[in-house]
Image (cartoon, grey):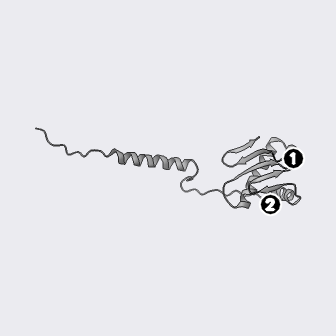
Amino acid sequence: MNYPSTKKPVNWAKWIVIGLLAFFGIGYMMCGRGGDPGSESKHLTLTAEEQKPIENLIEAGSLIIKYKDAYVPPLVWYNSDAQGKENFAAKLAIYATNKVGDDLYYCNIYDGMSGKKIAKWSKSWGYKVY
């Protein structure tokens, strides 16, 4: 004897939508936009000793910072070694970002004489020299 089926058909559309939402939600969090669950954005700061050289160059008129673009004196930049340039770029990015008041840490660095872009530093992408 054939009895009628009591099973309901599976609503695949509902499960596909739920799966896509979960997939993109996890991707959103892993890309840094949503952050880790329970974590907060980290605010970077410089010590007074780290800020002093930057502020001295600004007061002397040698270093110009406009938003997150820094115009660096060629003698300061070209007389530094590779690690010194990267450290200086990171400190400029932190200094400029804190002055702007957001948490997107980056800085474009230009030659103060020619205006040519010579480097950039960002918390997300790291350091790059042109």
Q: Position of residue 45 (x, y in %)?
A: 72, 58
> Camera-side residue: 103 or 41?
103
**SS category of the residue bearing label 1:** helix
Give the number of the disc on residue 87. none
| The N terminus - image quarter | top left
**SS category of the residue bearing label 2:** helix
Q: Residues within 10 Å of mark 1 (few under 14, many from 20)?
A: some
Q: Residue at x 47, y 46 (%)?
A: 23
Q: Mark 1 points at which residue?
A: 74
Q: Where is residue 101 in the image (x, y as percent from the top left)?
A: 69, 61
What amino acid does circle 2 point to? Ala
Q: Where is residue 104 in the image (x, y as percent from the top left)?
A: 66, 54
Q: Residue at x 75, y 49 (%)?
A: 108
What amino acid does circle 1 point to? Pro
Q: Is residue 60 left or right of residue 35?
A: right
Q: Distance between the residues labelled 1 and 2?
A: 24 Å
Q: Mark 2 points at which residue?
A: 48
Q: Where is residue 126 in the image (x, y as percent from the top left)?
A: 70, 45
> Camera-side residue: 52 or 89?
89
